[in-house]
Image (cartoon, helix red, strand yellow):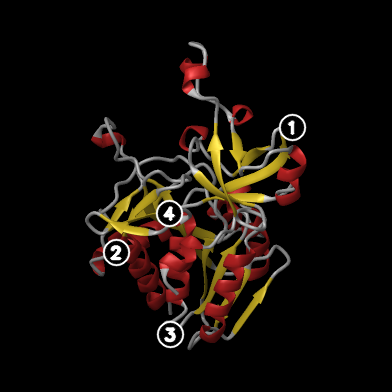
Amino acid sequence: MELKTLCELNGASGQEGAVRKAVLEAARPLCDDVHIDRMGNVIAFKKGRTGNRHILFSAHMDEVGFIILDATDDGLLIFRPVGGIDPRVTVSKYVLAGEKKLKGVIGALAIHLQTAEDRKRVLGYDNLYIDIGAKTKEEALADCPPGSYAYFDSAYQPFGDGCVVSKALDDRVGCYNLLRLLEGEYDADITCAFVTQEEVGLRGATGAAFAAQADTVIVLEGTTAGDMGAVEKARRVCEPGLGVVVSFMDNASIANRSLYQELLALAERKAVPCQIKRGSTGGNDAGAYQRSKAGVRTCVLSVPCRYIHGPSSVVKLSDVEAQYALAKAYAESAK
């Protein structure tokens, strides 16, 4: 399955159905067993030649999006983010709202009508609305009742020197590479977990971790690139084009030290471009896996992503390839 196909599917936390269906259909012919668990995760198992080891690779299917709460009397939708979205990146952006995928635009009070104080502060979600062209509250809620989702309306586009821009690159890049991993043959048993609701608290991974009982977990993620503007070199958490990012720590987990070192050594041996994540910000599903049952060895392999959690995030395809190459090398090295 192409990365473009995965990115252009809509699947915010709690509504991953379209992504789940596509992943399930793609994984089924590649696995010995594939099923959907109670959290909506797709769990794909591939029996190894020896089965002496069991490695779980994980990526999350959900993306950030919006959920409708109500509407104003004049037909503007009141909404909130699902996951962490900076309100500054949302104003004037196109969205698709409700089951009918109605075209909409996120709007705010025009600058001509704002006070001097308004212009000094960032407008929060209390001051933003989705305009779908409805004239009344009843009309708006007929098409987008409370609990409906809305998504950035952004196409996947190659641009520049080996870059792509799209919504949902976090973490459809990981899902894309999991499907590619399932095409290989390995000595170890391999489980690929495509999990739900990472963006709202690592919820799907908690269930997947409890059931899998793997001895090692490698999480494939997207992570915030820190190479923009006036950020000095020493504070650039990671940079697009320098390879897959290996994390020693973030706000949800601390990598198993021997596994972390093993992955770095393997990258050097196999000439896979890689970089160390120079910061401990953010968090991901490794936090859920690491603390499951008696605990499990975990480490995170990420793709640097500019403008993450926005309508137009950017990655380098060479980094996507490096993530796959290192994950595959680890799967092949496990005896």
* Residue, disc 4: 257
The first of marks 2 and 4 along the sequence is 4
The spot of residue 272 in percent (x, y) is 27, 65
The first of marks 2 and 3 along the sequence is 3
* Residue, disc 1: 73
- Rendering quarter of residue 262: bottom left
Q: Which residue lies at the image location 24% right of the left edge and 36% below the top edge?
A: 233
- What whole-number distance in Å separates the C-alpha atoms at marks 2 and 3? 20 Å
Residue nearest the viewer, comparing 152 with 265: 152
* Residue, disc 2: 267
- What whole-number distance in Å separates the C-alpha atoms at marks 2 and 4? 16 Å
Q: Which residue lies at the image location 48% right of the left edge and 57% below the top edge?
A: 171
Looking at numbered disc 1 in the image, what kind of residue is underneath it? Answer: Asp
The spot of residue 311 in percent (x, y) is 46, 47
- What whole-number distance in Å separates the C-alpha atoms at marks 3 and 4? 27 Å
Q: Is residue 28 left or right of residue 5?
A: right
* Residue, disc 3: 185
Q: Are marks 4 and 1 in contact (CB under 8 Å)?
A: no
Q: Tag 3, which secondary structure?
A: loop
The first of marks 4 and 1 along the sequence is 1
Q: Tag 1, which secondary structure?
A: loop
Q: Residues within 10 Å of mark 1 (few under 14, many from 20)?
A: few
Looking at numbered disc 4 in the image, what kind of residue is underneath it? Answer: Arg
Residue nearest the viewer, comparing 146 with 19: 146
Q: Residues within 10 Å of mark 2 (few under 14, many from 20)?
A: many
